[in-house]
Amino acid sequence: MFQAGDPVEIHFKSGNVCAGAHGKVAQFVRPLMEIHLADSLICESAVKPGATVTVAISGGTGLYCADAVIQRYYPATRQLIIAISGSFRFEQRRQHERYRCHMPVRLRVVGDTQWTGGECRDISAGGARIYLPKELVLRSNTVELVFISPTNQQGVRAMAEVVRTSKLLNDPGWEIGVRFTEMERVEKIQFARLLQYWASAREREPVRPD
């Protein structure tokens, strides 16, 4: 079903935050799958033997996903051995088209008063990928965002859920993936204009789906 070299993603929990790692299938002899991770894991304690993770492998118009249990992890070689639980399920890819951007954004965790500055690096009608210069302490998975429009420098507000967080390799910064959950009617109009700007032919570039 899957071959050596197929790209794979591992999703796991680190505290109350969903985290992810990328790699490639080394070999798969059901139920065991060997994966070579592209980067070293920051939260190695989250992938200790017995921990439950979700594995996702690209296939056509969607992803083949399955739950799995970690058997072993070798940090020195970034080798991960998992045991697949049950069968793979097929999930359709996101419906919203993404656009690359370099847009200032401010955000704060709901319940906090302090704002953090970052940069939105790609955006869609459903969510965004945001670069932060340092790790964001998440007391809640819900954040308030203010995107700074490049056309008039006005702020466009949105509420979102943090669905992914990861440490960048060879960079002190972090990236988070968010899914929009709430937006006022006026904000939706402003946000539509924001998307239209980044979807323009001179700005648009293809973005790999998550």
Image (cartoon, helix red, strand yellow):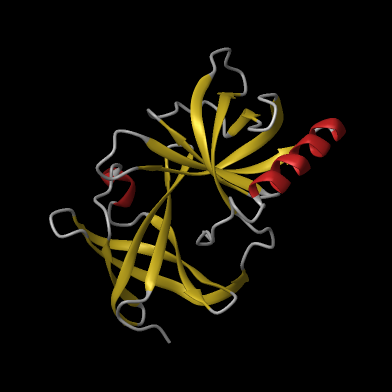
Residue placed furthest toward the top = 113
Task: Name the residue located 68 percent from the left edge and 32 percent from the top edge.
Answer: 151
Q: Is residue 2 above or below residue 13?
A: below
Left or right: 191, with 85 as reference point: right
Q: Is residue 113 above or below residue 170?
A: above
Question: Residue 198: image x %, image y %?
Answer: 64, 47
Residue placed furthest toward the left = 76
Task: Name the residue located 33 percent from the left edge and 43 percent from the top edge.
Answer: 168
**Where on the picture, by quarter, is residue 156?**
top right
Q: Is residue 196 above or below residue 132?
A: below
Q: Is residue 181 above or below residue 25?
A: above
Residue placed furthest toward the right = 185
**Where on the picture, by quarter, is residue 98?**
bottom right
Left or right: 160, with 66 as reference point: right
Question: Residue 118: image x %, image y %?
Answer: 49, 29
The quarter of the rendered structure image containing the N terminus is: bottom left
Question: Residue 187: image x %, image y %?
Answer: 79, 32
Residue closest to the eye, 8 or 133:
133
Question: Residue 101: image x %, image y %?
Answer: 55, 44
How many dots with numbers? Answer: 0
Task: Name the residue located 31 percent from the left edge and 76 percent from the top edge.
Answer: 32
Residue placed furthest toward the bottom = 1
Left or right: 71, with 185 as reference point: left
Left or right: 14, with 148 as reference point: left
Task: Name the residue located 68 percent from the left edge and 42 percent from the top edge.
Answer: 180
